[in-house]
Amino acid sequence: MFVTDARGVPSTWIVQWAGLIAPESRVLDVAAGRGRHAHFFAARGHKVTAVDRDVSRLAPHAGIESVQADLEDNSPWPLPGRRFDAVIVTNYLHRPLMPTLLDALAPGGVLLYETFMAGNERFGKPSRPEFLLQDGELLELVRGRFSVTAYEARMISEPHMAMVQRIAARRLS
Ligand SMILES: C[S@@+](CC[C@H](N)C(=O)[O-])C[C@H]1O[C@@H](n2cnc3c(N)ncnc32)[C@H](O)[C@@H]1O
């Protein structure tokens, strides 16, 4: 397992499918938080852009461009015209942003998305429907536009009990 410091351990899903992403390519980490995935991909030699409304927790790294932006206040998308070879989203859901995130992928680019799904409320937060994926929602999101490499909807026990949905998919065109 990839172990890191206070930024946290990268998701096993992200680590498992990181190899789908071409070496040294451009990775966008959405709602990056403390940067556990931004730093993971930067350490692998990728050019990382990390977006969050609070980038103060993101330790600087030569391979990481940090972008402070509120992604939910109806401001324009902070990276207009930019295309990435991978988009990473973990533990974050704002449905109106979904089309923009898919459009930010270059053809052939890889989407790695993992977040909580309906049923998680029995384990705690997030528990509000707007923060929980519905059954099959990630599959529906990419249907017709992506080739799905892997998809799971399941209960996990590490790092804590949760219901999650996760996908690894490649944009077709
Ligand atoms: C649960 S954390 C997940 C962080 C990271 N993706 C991870 O898995 O370690 C959710 C992140 O979403 C960010 N976030 C929440 N609302 C946001 C908004 N309106 N605009 C941008 N980022 C936001 C928070 O600042 C936080 O870093």
Image (cartoon, grey):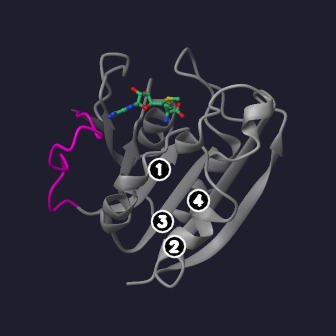
Amino acid type at mark 1: Ile
Real-space Cα separation, disc 4 to disc 2, in angstroms: 20 Å
Locate the N terminus by quadrant.
top right
Q: Position of residue 35 (x, y in %)?
A: 44, 29
Give the residue at mark 4: 19
Amino acid marked by disc 4: Gly
Q: Residues within 10 Å of mark 3 (few under 14, many from 20)?
A: many
- Foreground disc of the pair 2, 1: 2
Q: Mark 3 or 4, which is nearer the eye?
A: 3
Residue 172 position (above or below residue 65): below
Q: Going from the N terminus, do you reach mark 1 or mark 3 first? A: 1
Left or right, 167 with reference to 102: right
Q: Which mark is residue 110?
A: 3
Mark pair 2, 1: CA separation:
14 Å
Q: Which residue is mark 1?
A: 88
Image x and y of residue 120, in percent: 74, 38
| Dot in front, 2 or 3 | 2
Q: What residue do we see at 43% from left, 37% from top?
A: 38
Q: Amino acid at mark 3?
A: Val
Main secondary structure along the magenta-highlighted residues: loop
Residue on which the image places disc 2: 142
* Total residue callouts: 4
Upstream in the sequence, badge 3 or badge 4?
4
Q: Circle 2 — which element?
A: helix
